[in-house]
Amino acid sequence: MKDSARRSQPIVEHILTEIRRLHAQGRPWATLLAVCPNSESVLRAAVVAGTQMRAPMLLAATLNQVDLDGGYTGWTPEDLVRTTRELECRYGYPGHVCVCIDHGGPWLKDKQTSEHWSLDAAMNGVRDSLIAAMEAGYDMLHVDPTVDRTLPPDQCIQIDAVIERTLTLIRQVETHRRTQNLPRIAYEVGTEEVHGGLADMSVFRSFLQGLKSSLTQAGLEDVWPCFIVGKVGTDLHTSFFDGEVAQGLYREVQRFDSVIKGHYSDNVENPSAYPKNFMGGANVGPEFTEIEHDALVELAEREQAALGAHAKELGSDIVKALEIAVFNSNRWQKWLLPEEGDNFYELTAERRSWLVRTGCRYIWTQPQVLQARARLGENLKAVGIDSEAVIVQRIAHRIARYCRDFNLEGLLDEIRLDENLREE
């Protein structure tokens, strides 16, 4: 942004301020949607849906997805920001898509865990990633040092350590930002994970109070996270949002002028309950991978019908390519349940299907998958089907549904789009 250095308020905070202002004037509360850009199709769909809905849009990229090493998407932070801005121009998005880091903390990048990085190395790695994202033009950073691989598996990190490491990372980012005269950015802190130790309300309060005190003592009283992540009923294996819990958490953070962010909002059963209970935001990611996978399976069936007797000879075999790529990645092993063995092909067909559907986000850029997908596109193009357009529209349709449920539709027409949201 040409005028970004003159911002008095980070863009994400500006949008939340406008949501509060409009709510005070009678507009229903709006919950911001943060789409995890785990593929090019999902990123395109987010911009398409945001344009169609005229809705604010956040992207929440993990360090596994996008990082200095390219992540599993192949994008560096600069790549993600540049591609997002290009898509804004292509589709005529009427605002500014906010690019954010999701779960920026030690050992939350799989590589740091598998390679047994020390605490110092992991913290330094996260610091470098956060600073690189800020320099690339990200709008918000989720600082989440709630995992400690130096502890026994059954031991939670102490809340004082979480506060200290959160302060350390924010101070390092802010020191660099101010030295380089970069625009202000927004922050998100906390986690919904039990291993983070923030699930208990008394610990949650202690975290908020301790972080506030620590930031003030460090001379960072003007830096306070606008989002606090809360455990609101949803996790990897449950999909019902608990509005009563959410309201309780909101009352706690409202005193700090913050809002609650929910993670694991994929396939939530009651999305319209989010704004009714004053949720500030919600992250959705794996659900869109599943839609992309399912669209490819359906397109493969249409390809087979189009090729007829030549399907075996000329077909893409995309479904098999996806399964093999997920299996070879070994990423599926991170989702195994304690009672399950580690032999993929001894699992039930239902579990294998789930592991492939959710694990596809790790392998979209693998050469054999790209090759099969290109063949699929060529075969369907011959019968008048644009396979990639079909996939993007399927994902965009689901994103648009979240926009409606979260009261985001038309919001860009109502909020004040001053320097915070306009490109020059």
Image: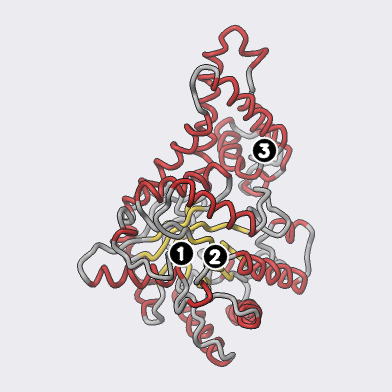
Is the residue 300 above or below the residue 109 in the image? above
Mark 3 or mark 1, which has the lower sequence index?
1
Q: Nearer the viewer, residue 191 or 43?
A: 43
Please identify, in this view, whether the residue under mark 3 or under mark 2 is nearer the observer: 3
Along the horizontal axis of the image, is 137 left or right of 199? right
Residue at x-position 51% and y-position 88%: 221
Q: Nearer the viewer, residue 155 or 25?
A: 25
Query: Percent position (x, y) of residue 185?
Result: 53, 73
Q: Nearer the viewer, residue 266 or 149?
A: 266
Q: Residue furthest front?
A: 424
Along the horizontal axis of the image, is 27 left or right of 245? left
Q: Are marks 2 and 1 in contact (CB under 8 Å)?
A: yes
CA gap, disc 3 and disc 1: 29 Å
**Quarter of the view holding residue 29:** bottom left
Q: Residues within 10 Å of mark 1 (few under 14, many from 20)?
A: many
Report the residue marked by disc 3: 326
Q: Residue furthest top?
A: 309
CA gap, disc 2 and disc 1: 9 Å
Report the residue marked by disc 2: 194
The amino acid on which the numbered mark 1 sits, given as a three-letter code, is Lys
Residue at x-position 57% and y-position 44%: 40
* SS under mark 2: helix
Which label belongs to residue 231? 1
Q: Residues within 10 Å of mark 2 (few under 14, many from 20)?
A: few
